[in-house]
Image (spheres, rainbow, N blue to C red):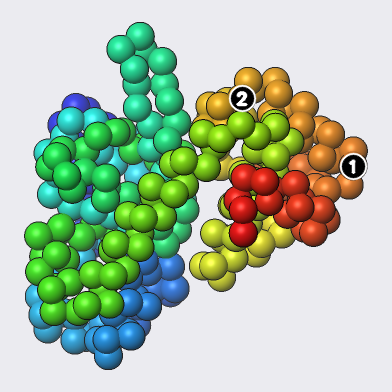
Amino acid sequence: MSGPGVVFPRSGPAVMADDGDALTFCSTCAFSQACMSEGMDKAALMDLHVLVEHVGPLHPGEHVFREGDPFGAIAAVRAGTVKTYQVDRNGHEQVLGFHLPGEVIGLNAIHDDRYPCNAVALDTVMLCRFSFPKIALLAQRLPNLQQHLFRLMSRDIGVASLFARDNTADERVAAFLIGLSRRLAARGFSPRRFQLTMSRTDIANYLRLAPETVSRVLRRFEQDGLVHIKRRDVEVLDMQRLEALALAVLRD
């Protein structure tokens, strides 16, 4: 499933989301809000032959797609975390992002018709696979869906530039934690209690910091009463102070 050239591996029969059915959108659906604002429920979308493939489970280390694979689909994460990354000519990995339930991967492949990066499951991952030609056709009929796709692409561009600025390690780590908190809260998950499904090394790579720096900052945050961390479980104890630290990066 993780060999070269494999795009969106499948695991047999389609697996439906636990909190969705034939008539009801999943709570983590990346497109439900845009579709419902057009008066389109799930049944109406099925009538338009917009096919959604439920893909998974993918296990840790299995790839959704690899850099250079032909582009034909985007995918929304239903469960789990997907890491996107590139490998430079010297074999060094550069982490581009972590994608949570309700977020979309593959949009950056539209321009060149090939995926410009790798996407790998960090834990058990479930996906909704959307044929891009079909969703593009639907977007012509649903202006809000088209706007939603543009917003998703714009968000990816904005997130990619966040940690290119000259911020301190404390500000970067705080922004990372607050960013996760806000993204999870937007999908109905707890903003104060969550898991770091990614390794400290991956976090450090993404933040352009050394792993020991990330570990040192997290220990200091614990000592200062901002967070409590047990292995990968995080509890935010002082959201206001953590947000104040993050503000230099997030700027909102």
| Residue 49 in sight from this viewpoint | yes
Q: Residue at x 84, y 40 (%)?
A: 222
Q: Residue at x 27, y 90 (%)?
A: 39
Query: In this figure, which residue is indicated by the disc labeled 1?
Result: 224
Q: Earlier in the sequence, mark 2 or mark 1?
A: 2
Q: Residue type at mark 1? A: Asp
Query: In this figure, which residue is indicated by the disc labeled 2?
Result: 209
Q: Residue at x 80, y 47 (%)?
A: 227
State the CA–CA distance, disc 2 to disc 1: 21 Å
Quadrant in which the N terminus appears: top left
Q: Is residue 78 above or below residue 232?
A: below
Q: Is residue 110 above or below residue 47?
A: above
| Residue 56 in sight from this viewpoint | no
Q: Are marks 2 and 1 in contact (CB under 8 Å)?
A: no
Q: Is residue 63 left or right of residue 6?
A: right
Q: Name the one closer to the observer, 241 or 202.
A: 241
Decide: few, some or many residues near mark 2? Use Cα within 10 Å; few <14, some 14-19, many ≥20. Answer: some
Residue 22 % position (x, y): 27, 81
Q: Which mark is residue 165?
A: none
Q: Secondary structure at mark 1?
A: loop
Q: Residue at x 44, y 73 (%)?
A: 27
Q: Is residue 172 left or right of residue 146?
A: right
Q: Residue type at mark 2? A: Leu
